Amino acid sequence: MHHPTATERVAAGRAAALRDVQRRNLLRCAGLALCCAALLGVLLALVESRWGPLVRLDRGWVRPLHDYAREHTAWTASMQTLADLGGTVTMRVLLGAAAVWLWCLGARTLAFWAAAQALVGWALAAAARAAIDRPRPHFADAVGHASGGAFPSGHATASAITCAALLALVWPRADRVGRAVASSAAALAVLAVGWTRIALGVHWPSDVVGGWLAAGVVLGGVTVAVELWRPGALLRDARRVDWRTRPRVQRVLATGAAPRGGPDKDT
C-alpha cells in the first residue's frame, strides 16, 4: 500500500485549496451575474411601463441639470471633456491594451477574458439599446448630443466593465493601501462618467443605473463562462502575471519556495 510522501500531501493540499478558491470565485461571479440580471429586468420593466415614480425621478434630475449646464458654459465644457475621456472607445482601448499586455506575458486565458469583457459589453449594450429603443431626453437648446436608444447607457456600461476588470487585475498584486486607492479611483471614475451622461442631458438616471447593472451581468457572466471553459486557468494566469511582473530580486529570493522556472505551467 502506497503511503503519500510529505511532498505529495502538500501538493494535494494545495490542489484542494485551489479548487476551493475556484469554486468560491465561480459562485461569486454567478451570483453577481444573476443578481444584476434580475435587477436589470425589474428596472427595464419599470422603464417600459413608464412607472410614475421612476419617470418623475428621471425628469427631476435631468431638467435642473440641463438648465444649470445651459447657464454655465465652463461646467458644460468640463462635463463634455470628462465624457470624452471616459468614452466607450477609450474604455475599450484600455481594456484591449491590458489584453495585449497579458498575452505578451503568456497569460493567454486572462488576455482572452479581458478582451471578451470589452467585446461582450459592447455587443450587449448595443443590442439592448437597439431592441429597447428608449427615447433620450430632448431639449430644444440641448447642450449635449448622442444618437441611438437611451437604455442602457453605453458609457456607463463600458466604464464599469473596464474599471472593474482593471481593478481585478491589480487587486492580487496590491497591498491594503494600494487596493483602497485603486478601488476608490475605479469607483470615482465610474460615477464620474455616469454623472456626465446625466449632466449633459443625453441620458436619464435610470439609463446609467441600467448600464451599471448590464456591466455586472457581463463581468460575472464572462468570468463564469471562461472558468467553465478552462477551469483554474484564470487563477494560474494571475499567478503567472504576478511572477513575471515581480521585481527580479524578489523572483530570485522566491526560487527557494517556488518551482524552478516560475509558476505552474498551464497544461
Image: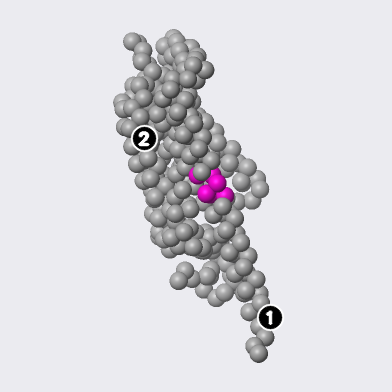
Secondary structure type for disc 1 = helix
Q: Is residue 139 above or below residue 114?
A: above
Query: Horizontal and vertical percent for residue 18?
Result: 59, 64
Q: Which residue is mark 1?
A: 6
Which residues lie in the magenta part?
28-33
Q: Residues within 10 Å of mark 2 (few under 14, many from 20)?
A: some
| Residue found at the very far bottom of the displayed protein | 1
Q: Nearer the viewer, residue 161 or 101?
A: 161
Q: Which mark is residue 128?
A: 2
Secondary structure type for disc 2 = helix
Q: Which mark is residue 238?
A: none
Most common SS among magenta residues:
helix
Q: Is residue 46 magenta?
A: no
Q: Is residue 95 above or below residue 73?
A: below
Query: Which residue is located at x 40 percent, y 59 percent?
Result: 103
Query: Horizontal and vertical percent for residue 96?
Result: 38, 48
Q: Is residue 29 magenta?
A: yes
Q: Quadrant of residue 91?
A: top left
Please give the count of numbered marks on the rendered protein: 2
Q: Is residue 82 above or below residue 216?
A: above
Q: Amino acid at mark 2?
A: Ala
Q: Nearer the viewer, residue 190 or 77?
A: 190
Compared across the picture, whether 36 is left or right of 180 comes to: left
Report, in whole angstroms, how far the alpha carbon at label 1 lies from the one at label 2.
55 Å
Query: Horizontal and vertical percent for residue 57?
Result: 51, 18
Query: Horizontal and vertical percent for residue 211?
Result: 45, 33
Q: Residues within 10 Å of mark 1 (few under 14, many from 20)?
A: few
